[in-house]
Amino acid sequence: MSPRALPLLIVLALLAGASSASAHPALYHYLEINLHQPGQVTVYVTVHAPELSDEVAPLEEDVFGAEWLASLDDATIAGLVANAERFGDEKFAFSFGERSAELALDFPDADVIRLPAADTEVPAGCFSGVASLAYAPGENTLTLQFADTADKRLMLVINRPAAFPEVFDIEPGTAREIQLPPAPEIRRFAWSKAHVSAIAAAIVGIAVLLVIRRRRT
């Protein structure tokens, strides 16, 4: 099981009700944020593929569209990925304080989307995109704005080191402020007297060698 599988399984278990359909992202938008690396926020956006297509709805026996997704050619899947990118841009906005952060999602290739591995953490009929948002020392919060044009609520999962996943149910048109672990300080090279003396000595040595060489010639 991959590191991302546990949070998603926990969320699906929390959502599970009388039927299996109640536990599927088809009823929620799903976004996962990993804060395992200070200075970097990793964002996973999971989309339900049939909702990105205007052409074909999955058959009744193919409840979530897994078989339908597996039958698509590369060109059709490329269209779904383009729609997924548009969805991410339109529904989610991120900022570190007053600085906006671009959500540049990276998606797997068509074969992985069409036929994900048996132990994949992505639910049936879905695929995920991932983006990394870097932040600097002094940027202590990330604000997620969920668009009021969304047609479903958002299930937000936040993963922190050595902590149980935090799960939030967010309605369209609202924002969530997320506390970030401090970003590592960027060490700047400080010139000391020893550094200056060593460089000066090296320059003098080179100059002496050049003078000696000229005299010999």
Image (tube, rainbow, N blue to C red):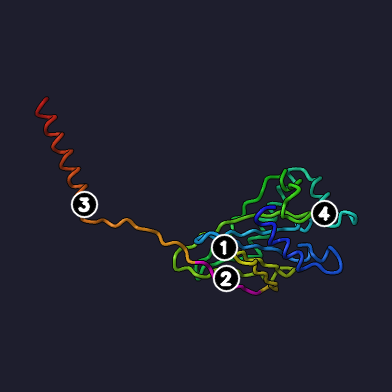
Q: Residues under labels 4 and 2: Cα distance?
A: 33 Å
Kind of element beneath mark 2? strand
Mark 1 touches mark 4? (CB < 8 Å): no
Mark 2 touches mark 1? (CB < 8 Å): yes
Q: Residues under labels 1 and 3: Cα distance?
A: 41 Å
Mark 1 touches mark 3? (CB < 8 Å): no
Looking at marks 4 and 3 on the same chain, the residue that comes earlier in the sequence is marked by: 4
Looking at marks 1 and 3 on the same chain, the residue that comes earlier in the sequence is marked by: 1
Position of 78 compared to 200: left or right? right
Write down the residue under mark 4.
Answer: 65
Q: Which mark is residue 196?
A: 3
The amino acid beneath tag 1 is Leu
Please state which of residues 199 and 53 is positioned toward the viewer in this rendering. Answer: 199
Looking at marks 2 and 1 on the same chain, the residue that comes earlier in the sequence is marked by: 1
Q: Quadrant of residue 7?
A: bottom right
Q: Which mark is residue 178?
A: 2
Q: Quadrant of residue 45?
A: bottom right
Query: Which residues lie in the magenta part?
Result: 174-181
The amino acid beneath tag 3 is Val
Kind of element beneath mark 1? strand
> Which mark is nearer the camera, 2 or 1?
1
